[in-house]
Amino acid sequence: MNIRWKPSSFSGVVLIAITIACLFMVKHNVHGISKEIHRLNNAIMKEKEAIHILHAEWAFLTQPNKLAKLADKHLDLQPMAGKDIKRLSMDNLISEANQTTDKPGAN
Amino acid sequence: MNGLSRKHLLRTAEKSAAERTELALQTFRNRIRFTTVVISLLFTVLAARIVELNIYGADEINKSTTSSRSLDFILKRGDIVDRQGVLLATNLTTASLFINAKEVIEPTLSAKKLHEALPDISLNELENKFTSGKSFHWIKRHVSPDEQQRVHNLGLPGLYFTRDERRIYPQSNLFSHTIGVVDVDGNGISGLEKQFDEQLLLSQAKHSNLQTTLDLRVQSIVHEELQKAVDLNQAVGGSSIIMDVNTGEVISMVSLPDFDPHHIQRSTERQRFNQTTLGVYEMGSTMKLTTVATAIDTDTVNLHDTFDVSAPLHFGKYTINDYSTKNGSLTAPEVLMYSSNRGTAKIVERFGKQTQRQYISNLGMLSKVKIELPETSAPLYPSEKNWSMLSMITISYGYGLSITPLHVVKAVAAMVNGGVLYEPTIIKKEAKPQGVRVLSEKTSEYMRKMLRLIVEHGGGKRANIPGFFPGGKTGTSEILINGRYSKRANLGSFVGAFPINDPKYAVIVLIDQAKPNEFNHWLTIGGIVAAPVAGSIIKRAGPLLGVWPQEDQSERVNEELTLDFTPSFKPLTQIKQ
């Protein structure tokens, strides 16, 4: 039996072939991307856990008494006394400026 | 004819066969066309969908991927943080070792090898587990990575690790009483861990931490200063609370001795006892503040009324004496300044026991403090029927009513903040809490001025830190030992607020059973053992809490805080500084 290939049939077969190829490629890509997502998710989880552990470690290492000991050892600092602190206000500045100008010899 | 008709018949037959073939072919072609069209249509739809997914579908794929796979790092229990967000309690993943004894080969030898790797577990215990024949036995919960490696290296059959979680307290002892602890399975058994057990078990999934009002930096300062005082005074223990007077937020809560929350099994009962909320004590002279506040609020005493304190008072077989006798009369501010029991007893007689009980109740001293901790004690006090005249007198200066330090700080906060009582809280809330007015603003103003007077000229001088303007009252009470008040065992205390001209924080310090020694000049009274601790705490923690020293403003503030009264006993200028 002699079957003739009509242009429409031919284009149909080509379309099917292209579609199958595309479908395969898409599936292959999706599979690859899924694996990548899975890997990334695992990596993110591990990073989050690591960050969580680092937070705990940071809190442990920055205990105030530990920091105080380190500061005592390495820094030459003294606690501030009340008299070391002055309030900066316009009134103070003006009165200080007036005192300066009132002094003999000042311009 | 016969030949013709046969031919005709043959042709007809051939013709009809050809027609049938043509018909069948036609049908076949039609079916092929139909099938082609249907399949083409299907593939066109598929192709269109592929094109659509490639161009527009990325979001859709992402959505389905993320929803099916949670990216959350989930732990069984939420974190507890301080008011700045610093971690106070968290879960860390660990491994726990268990055994399936059915899979063990040579149990005795295996037990011996494991004992060498984990020497803290007895050989006997391991042998029992290895020979039990059971499919599950814990060998050790929460093994360290090092121990895990050692067990791995043994390569023994029947031993397995499973993922587990352990509660970690990065600040060690610092918050052991308030944060509390969990058991080996991670269930809260004390403190906030117990109070908020359910919420903490849910919170990790909801991504919310339990935020407390506590401040790590202030807690550390209070802990350090209190520990120093307990050591130097050779005391049995000590406790301290700092509370925001305008919200009731507890900034710091320390009870000494404390314990390491990671090793609660090694702690003693005394270490686990939270003195700030569980310890009920007869507070001594700090209760005089309640008596004087009641007298001023009820207008039964004014600042010029004088009370003769030269002679002891007798009630039946009881005699009421003063620590340091003053031969003369005192005004109400002087009664507080010199901490006169006789003067306080005379003041309370002015308004009577009903009013006294009412005010003490209004100030929250007859009920449990509603703080978010499971360890709270109810006050101990006489029933209304047994609240006798003698009870009234002794309660007026701090005996006969046992309350916790938290009760005292809560009441004093109300006395200085304008007269509004706030329930202490340890959990950060967004809305400002609603207080209850218990004293008038005028009474509160008088109380602030009197508290300043006590620190400037009375027993609280050692708490006076220049620029911070603290105000407060000291107290010393004898402790009941075997039913008798011991002359040797004292509870020295200081309660106050700073800066007293515009109070922000209330502070209480108690030193339990200090021993007379050179450091305290052989005196274990509140003014010597507790007031300096409060001073040091105020000096160091004040700036961290936003209270800056105002030494340059001293003149103005002192003028604001001057109490308009004439001392009856001795002019203020003649009192030794």
Image (cartoon, coloured by chain):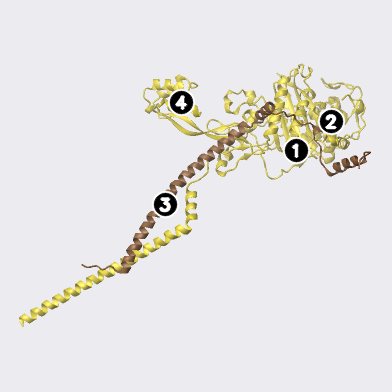
Q: CA distance from mark 4 to mark 2?
A: 72 Å
For marks 4 and 1 on the same chain, the one whose residue lies earlier in the sequence? 4
* Residue type beneath disc 2: Val
- The quadrant holding residue A93 is top right
- On residue B380, the disc is none
Q: Nearer the viewer, residue B82 or A76?
A: A76
Q: Upstream in the sequence, badge 1 or badge 2?
A: 2
Q: Position of residue B179 (x, y in %)?
A: 63, 33
Q: Nearer the viewer, residue B394 or B550?
A: B550
Q: CA distance from mark 2 to mark 3?
A: 88 Å
Q: Are marks 4 and 1 on the same chain?
A: yes
Q: Position of residue B544 (x, y in %)?
A: 73, 35
4 or 2: mark nearer the eye = 4
Placement of B114 over or under B289, stated as above or below: above
| Residue type pointed to by label 1 | Gly
* Residue under label 1: B546
Where does label 2 land, which residue?
A: B348
Q: Would residue B238 be visible to someone looking at this image?
A: no
The circle drawn on residue A29 is 3
Q: CA distance from mark 1 to mark 2?
A: 38 Å
Disc 4: which residue: B150
